[in-house]
Image (tube, coloured by chain):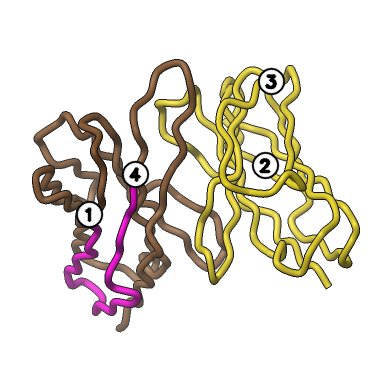
Chain colours: A yellow, B brown
Amino acid sequence: KAGVTQTPRYLIKTRGQQVTLSCSPISGHRSVSWYQQTPGQGLQFLFEYFSETQRNKGNFPGRFSGRQFSNSRSEMNVSTLELGDSALYLCASSLDSNNEQFFGPGTRLTVL
Amino acid sequence: AQTVTQSQPEMSVQEAETVTLSCTYDTSESDYYLFWYKQPPSRQMILVIRQEAYKQQNATENRFSVNFQKAAKSFSLKISDSQLGDAAMYFCAYRRVMTGTASKLTFGTGTRLQVTL
């Protein structure tokens, strides 16, 4: 079975721009969660989607949004990028909310 | 709010030796999961081991085992016969059991494990 895939793997943007990151979960997994990893704040939960519905959201500003499609693929969008948004964004999928999460390789976002 | 604490920012172990990574957590819940994840330099987060809080028996996965002390809210990871490939950042994580909605993973700050020859 193919693992969780994330595209792109690396991204460089400038302040004020917006960005869209994509995540394809393991086949059959309906839950997709997003995490932000930075040296200063560590790993922080962004949001979780299940069957196209956002079920949980972390403490991030409204500039961070996401969605999930009928095939369980998920995208997250960050608008009006700030320097502090530079991070590794990790996506994780699971069968449902109470199963272990399997992580993708991450997207490294650099904001200049 | 749940918190996870890893008090050892860095650890070092010689190849073939045993090392124990510490983790404590704080929660008022009685039903939850605990995990250890490994993040090598490739940055891919890999699940090492999982423990259900209702199970008294400590989980084991080959060379990896945990010491789960529910009353003390302690969850340590023991790596036996350490190998060079074990060098990575290790994260302890907590997840509450919920029905009908999602429960996020709460991570500790990580322990960087170095394996020396």
Give me the chain letter of mark 3: A
Local SS, label 1? loop
Residue type at numbered disc 1: Arg
Marks 1/4 same chain: yes
Residue that appears at 17% across and 68% down: B18
In what quadrant of the picture does the C terminus of chain A appear?
Answer: bottom right
Specify the amino acid type for callout 3.
Glu
Number of the front mark, 2 or 1: 2
To which chain does the residue with label 1 belong? B
The amino acid type of the residue labelled 2 equals Thr
- Residue A109 x/y as whole percent: 74, 61
Using the image, tell me which numbered label, if any, was put on residue B63. Answer: 1
Direction from residue A34 to residue B52 in the image, left or right: left
List x then y, in percent, for residue A20. Answer: 82, 46
For residue A45, say whether it is visible: yes
Q: Which mark is residue A52?
A: 3
C-alpha gap between disc 1 and disc 4:
22 Å
Q: Are marks 1 and 3 on the same chain?
A: no
Query: For mark 4, what is the residue?
Result: B94
Few, some or many residues within 10 Å of mark 1 (<14, 14–19, 20+): few
Q: Are marks 2 and 4 on the same chain?
A: no
Classify B58 as above or below A89.
above
Q: Nearer the viewer, mark 1 or mark 4?
A: 4
Magenta part of the chain: B2-24
Q: What kind of element bears circle 3? A: loop
> N-terminal of the two: label 3 or label 2?
2
Q: Identify the residue under disc 2.
A: A5
Q: Chain of mark 4?
A: B
Q: Position of residue B55 (x, y in %)?
A: 15, 31
